[in-house]
């Protein structure tokens, strides 16, 4: 989101004739991510009646999810209620609910609760979801990092297993836990960097009795370098920095299978893992946008007209990760799935709705590339501006910190995050290292988990039985998004026996061709901050 102050939107005309027969144009925006929010911010200033629908009642700042997952920030620090964001916009209403389908002919949305919402113009900004790319066992045993609920689940699992290692080190292979992060894009780099910092803190400040020498963090990437969408020197810097901090970085290492005890690599190597975090890519398959009529491109992204409308439906626009948003005139390949594209395309879609309302021709979208950023940890980040040198080290880190603060929604969140970072920087004790998985309310997350072998490995031992299923769930939950993982066939029964004959190098190609373990998508590093 742009740091635009919220201004009261223009009032909806009370005289129906002021805006056409039957009242103001009804604009519906599905999704309160970066694209949806920015569309609505622009629409709020137009004489239209806006409804924003989301199955979460909050906006999630995805770039900081990894900090929630590694106990650096609280979930509430990176989320903001949609109703609060638009509380002063009198022509905007929020509807909490899951849109099940779009009837393009009737111009109606159907919600999962059976309600229908008619529209005159529609913006579909439903984002993407975790892509497992058919890797056996990944849906069931790997922990995705896409939603706030995912991040909280990773945090619970990681902290739970550290406590279990303190209490019963003999339960763990090698006497200590090991963590595997799949995908060497920005999310994977950031997560593995933050994990080693959490381990250090756990031993040094929390006096957990785990052997740092034997505790492992592995980062697996199918491609030949980290940070695929960045310049090569950014990947080399990230790799060298992570390795110097103790992360085992493995390139050209696709994952063939995930079980509750670890991962099998495409070359047959078995890697024990207490927790497997999946940052291997995203897909639009299985989301609402995938059900729209028309053609779809790599990663299931909806192919669009240059003005971002759906072909054959000039009243429907697709913005953000859901669409194959083109770079602009003269360059029709899709932009990366990053926040800046979502922000700019959401705003553009809203502008086009305004132009159509005024009887003006629509204009082609043009992406203004502001660069990419990723952090590796304390005093280490890369900031790749569109022009000029690559910033790295402390300078890149400060740029990364500043930019994330600016783009975070809500003054309260910015203040809290700043204090948190400062606190941690000074190495003061405390921080949100709380395991909250043992409260009854959490069980809702698990009620939708696929049927599963409850697991017998140390990761499972670290969790109550009801929580041993970590994978992305099929269907939809009240706290999660539609979580079908379409690229992945229903996972086969777990193959917990590491000694079993290795699968052929299954790792099917990710949308960018990188295969599981590849962290990039359409040259977009999921998790890379667009500066
Ligand atoms: C872990 C992670 C880290 C990232 N880090 C960075 C980074 O550092 N920098 C960067 O530039 N980009 C980063 N990205 C990518 C960036 O966050 C996305 O490109 C951006 O969020 C896309 O915005 P969007 O609005 O298209 O979709 P989203 O932000 O995904 O929003 C989609 C919204 O639609 C809602 N929704 C979906 N389906 C339905 C439905 N059927 N009914 C109702 N509501 C629905 C969802 O609840 C959600 O609120 C990261 C992504 C992830 C997952």
Image (cartoon, rainbow, N blue to C red):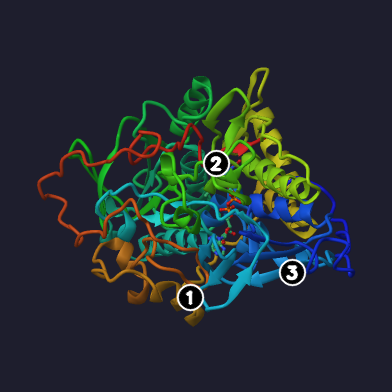
Q: Which mark is residue 304?
A: 2
Q: Is residue 187 above or below residue 94?
A: above
The residue identified by callout 1 is 442
> Which quadrant of the figure contains the C terminus?
top right
Q: Nearer the viewer, mark 1 or mark 2?
A: 2
Residue 146, position as x, y percentages in the image: 50, 54
Q: Residue furthest top?
A: 388
Out of 46 and 161, give the one closest to the viewer. Answer: 46
Horizontal relation, residue 224 to residue 502: left or right: right
Q: Residue furthest left?
A: 501
The residue identified by callout 3 is 93
Q: Are marks 1 and 2 in contact (CB under 8 Å)?
A: no
Q: CA distance from mark 2 to mark 3?
A: 27 Å
Q: Earlier in the sequence, mark 2 or mark 3?
A: 3
Residue 243, position as x, y percentages in the image: 43, 31
Q: Nearer the viewer, mark 2 or mark 3?
A: 2
Residue 381 shows in the view: no
């Amino acid at each position: 989101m742009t740091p635009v102050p919220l201004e009261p939107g223009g009032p909806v005309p009370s005289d129906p004739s002021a805006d056409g027969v039957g009242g103001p144009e009804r604009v519906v925006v599905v999704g309160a991510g970066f694209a949806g929010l920015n569309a609505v911010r622009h629409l709020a200033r137009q004489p239209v009646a806006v409804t924003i629908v989301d199955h979460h009642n909050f906006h999630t700042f995805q770039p900081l999810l990894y900090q929630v997952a590694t106990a650096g920030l609280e979930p509430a620090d990176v989320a903001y209620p949609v109703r609060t964001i638009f509380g002063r916009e009198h022509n905007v209403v929020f509807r909490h609910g899951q849109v099940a389908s779009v009837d393009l002919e009737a111009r109606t949305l159907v919600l999962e609760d059976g309600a229908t919402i008619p529209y005159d113009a529609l913006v579909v900004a439903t984002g993407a979801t975790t892509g497992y790319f058919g890797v056996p066992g990944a849906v069931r045993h790997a922990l995705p990092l896409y939603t706030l609920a995912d991040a909280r689940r990773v945090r619970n699992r990681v902290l739970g297993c550290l406590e279990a290692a303190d209490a019963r080190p003999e339960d763990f292979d090698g006497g200590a836990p090991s963590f595997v992060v799949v995908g060497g894009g920005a999310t994977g780099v950031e997560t593995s960097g933050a994990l080693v910092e959490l381990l250090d803190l756990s031993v040094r400040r929390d006096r957990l009795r785990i052997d740092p020498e034997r505790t492992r963090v592995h980062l697996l990437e199918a491609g030949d370098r980290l940070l695929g969408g960045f310049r090569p020197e950014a990947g080399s810097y990230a790799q060298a920095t992570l390795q110097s901090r103790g992360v085992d970085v493995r390139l050209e290492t696709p994952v063939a299978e995930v079980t509750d005890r670890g991962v099998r690599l495409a070359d047959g190597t078995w890697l024990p893992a207490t927790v497997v975090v999946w940052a291997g890519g995203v897909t639009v398959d299985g989301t609402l946008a995938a059900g729209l009529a028309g053609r779809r491109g790599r990663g299931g992204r909806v192919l669009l007209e240059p003005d971002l409308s759906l072909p054959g439906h000039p009243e429907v626009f697709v913005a953000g990760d859901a669409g194959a948003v083109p770079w602009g005139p003269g360059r029709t390949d899709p932009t990366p799935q990053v926040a800046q594209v979502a922000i700019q395309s959401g705003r553009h879609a809203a502008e086009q709705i305004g132009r159509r309302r005024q009887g003006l021709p629509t204009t082609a979208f043009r992406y203004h590339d502001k660069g990419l950023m990723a952090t590796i940890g304390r005093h280490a980040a890369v900031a790749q501006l569109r022009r000029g040198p690559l910033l790295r080290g402390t300078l890149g880190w400060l740029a990364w910190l500043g930019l994330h603060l600016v783009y975070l929604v809500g003054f309260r969140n910015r203040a809290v995050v700043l204090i948190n970072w400062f606190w941690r920087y000074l190495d003061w004790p405390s921080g949100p290292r709380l395991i909250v998985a043992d409260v009854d309310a959490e069980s809702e997350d698990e009620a939708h988990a696929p049927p599963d072998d409850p697991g017998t490995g140390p990761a499972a031992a670290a969790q109550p039985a009801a929580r041993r299923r970590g994978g992305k769930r099929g269907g939809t939950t009240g706290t999660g998004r539609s979580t079908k993982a379409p690229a992945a066939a229903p996972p086969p029964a777990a193959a917990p026996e590491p000694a079993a004959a290795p699968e052929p190098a299954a790792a099917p190609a990710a949308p960018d061709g990188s295969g599981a373990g590849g962290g990039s998508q359409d040259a977009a590093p999921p998790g890379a901050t667009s500066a």
